[in-house]
Image: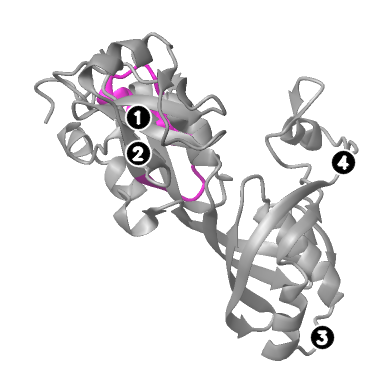
């Protein structure tokens, strides 16, 4: 079977998330591989890579909070909302104090309405928005609610601001910066964007892109492989008796009086991660996502690749 687990990689600037996946696929010679949340080509930072059975856990990774450090350039508006785009307008930047900036930032914390940018990977009638944007088309994008947990002002050096943004799934930091520029009154575009955290995973633990592209031997990558269940570290765990493991693996609900209805759990038996279960109102643990790894090789790590 393919190896299963998680590898943390730092995406380089100007590189697409797909190119990172392709580079790893060539090195590891593994079929099932994907990433835990697209980064813009201009952006850098943490790109979690899921291998083998662990790709089933992608939604549980992309749902986790993310943290970014972003530098925005005030007084410049571009079509892509970042510095790589075509400049649409340049405006004078007003005098701004740190206090005034922090006051404005408070208005963008919490549940906010956001219009996705045209230069994004969202679909419109079967086509990516960025494909339409490159052809000069603009389509209506309904606003959607996203959650911003915190925004911290790291540096004020007009016309630039550097921020740390902690946010939930689906938040476009480029749109957030553009909206902040509108609130200031002069517009803004993103000059630098780096994702520094996804859930409990940090950029400090990622393999830099500059090192990845120099690798010819996959051994250093296998040595970085994390077990799949680390993606679910935020979930409580339940250990089943050995006799219940085959039932769970075959999709059977397991009687349990210690589960909460609709709550998700990491399910383990005999030291092996079996998958994700959900508590029900009938005091049972219902399988919702099964993980097929052999008991002899619970992490799905390929023999001889350690």
State which region is magenta.
Answer: 9-33
Residue 37 in sight from this viewpoint: no
Check disc 1: other Cα within 10 Å, few if <14, some if 14-19, many if 20+: many
Distance CA(mark 4)–CA(mark 3): 31 Å
Give percent across and percent down for residue 130.
Answer: 73, 36
Of the two numbered discs 4 and 3 on the same chain, state the one appearing first in sequence.
3
Nearer the observer, 190 or 223: 223
The mark found on residue 237 in the picture is 2
Distance CA(mark 2)–CA(mark 3): 53 Å
Check disc 2: other Cα within 10 Å, few if <14, some if 14-19, many if 20+: some
Nearer the observer, 161 or 224: 224
**Element at label 4:** loop
Question: Residue 57 colored magenta?
Answer: no
Distance CA(mark 2)–CA(mark 4): 39 Å
Nearer the observer, 83 or 299: 299
Of the two numbered discs 4 and 1 on the same chain, state the one appearing first in sequence.
4
Q: Are marks 2 and 4 in contact (CB under 8 Å)?
A: no
Q: Residue at x 55, y 44 (%)?
A: 39
Location of mark 4 (residue): 142
Q: Are marks 4 and 1 in contact (CB under 8 Å)?
A: no
The mark found on residue 267 in the picture is 1
């Amino acid at each position: 079977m393919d190896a299963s687990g998680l590898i943390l990689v730092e995406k380089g600037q100007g590189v697409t998330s797909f190119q990172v996946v392709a580079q790893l696929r060539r090195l590891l010679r593994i079929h099932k591989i994907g990433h835990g949340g697209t980064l813009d080509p201009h952006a850098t930072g943490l790109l979690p890579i899921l291998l083998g059975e662990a790709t089933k856990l992608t939604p549980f990774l992309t749902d986790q909070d993310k943290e970014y450090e972003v530098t925005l350039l005030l007084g410049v508006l571009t079509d892509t909302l970042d510095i790589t785009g075509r400049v649409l307008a340049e405006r004078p930047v007003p005098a701004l104090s740190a206090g005034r900036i922090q006051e404005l930032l408070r208005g963008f914390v919490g549940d906010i309405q956001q219009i996705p940018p045209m230069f994004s990977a969202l679909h419109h009638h079967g086509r990516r928005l960025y494909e339409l944007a490159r052809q000069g088309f603009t389509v209506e994008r309904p606003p959607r609610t996203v959650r911003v947990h915190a925004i911290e002002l790291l540096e004020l050096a007009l016309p630039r601001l550097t921020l740390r943004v902690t946010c939930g799934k689906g938040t476009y930091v480029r749109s957030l910066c553009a909206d902040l520029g509108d609130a200031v009154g002069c517009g803004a575009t993103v000059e630098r964007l780096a994702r520094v955290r996804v859930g409990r995973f940090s950029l400090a633990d990622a393999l830099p892109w500059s090192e990845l592209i120099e690798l010819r031997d996959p051994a250093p990558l296998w040595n970085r492989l994390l077990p799949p269940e680390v993606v679910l570290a935020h979930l409580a765990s339940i250990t089943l008796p050995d006799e219940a493991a085959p039932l769970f693996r075959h999709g059977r609900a397991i009687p349990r009086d210690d589960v909460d209805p609709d709550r998700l759990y990491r399910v383990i038996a005999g030291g092996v991660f079996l998958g994700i279960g959900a508590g029900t109102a009938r005091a049972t643990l219902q399988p919702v996502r099964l993980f097929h790894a052999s008991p002899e090789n619970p992490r799905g790590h390929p023999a001889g690749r350690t």
